[in-house]
Amino acid sequence: MSNTVTVKLSQEIQTHQGPKAEIELKEPLARDFRLYGEAVKVVPLDNGRVSFEYKDDAVLKFLSSVTGLDGAILDNLPAGDYLKARSALTNLIFGIAGENPQ
């Protein structure tokens, strides 16, 4: 059984399958990491917390792979929806890796 996350969009997007008010992200595959590299990196901070460093080109490729939507469609998401999708992807990746990925 694979993990999925649904992101509700602030406005519908037009896809090849018609308008969508939400997008579903499925669990990334090893292939995605091999083809696109690391989309997100955990950066430890001095105060014991962490920050995330993103490679947005890789994020877009990951999002295309896990949603089945063309990169051109995802490029036209409103910024807030893109950030929600990027956050959902981050949660999927680190949920798969566990609490302490090595």
Image (cartoon, rainbow, N blue to C red):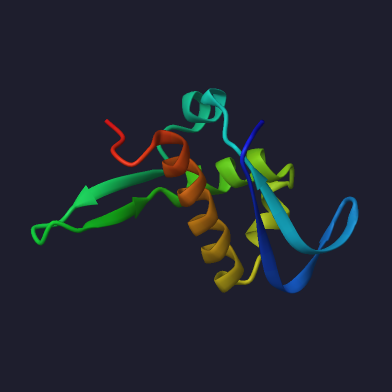
Q: Is residue 26 above or below residue 1?
A: below
- Could you tell me which residue is drawn at 69 percent across and 67 percent down? 8
Q: Considering the image in quadrants, where does the N terminus appear?
A: top right
Work out whether residue 33 or residue 87 is closer to the camera in this orientation and state it. 87
- Could you tell me which residue is drawn at 32 percent across and 44 percent down? 41
Residue 52 x %, y %: 32, 54
Q: Quadrant of residue 22?
A: bottom right
Residue 75 x %, y %: 64, 58
Say left or right for 76 vs 31.
right
Q: Considering the image in quadrants, where does the C terminus appear?
A: top left
- Could you tell me which residue is drawn at 49 percent across and 33 percent down? 36
Work out whether residue 49 or residue 64 is closer to the camera in this orientation and state it. 49
Residue 73 x %, y %: 73, 56
Judged from this view, the residue extending furthest toward the bottom is 10
Say left or right for 21 vs 76.
right
Judged from this view, the residue extending furthest toward the left is 46
- Could you tell me which residue is drawn at 55 percent across and 23 percent down? 31
Work out whether residue 94 or residue 80 is closer to the camera in this orientation and state it. 94
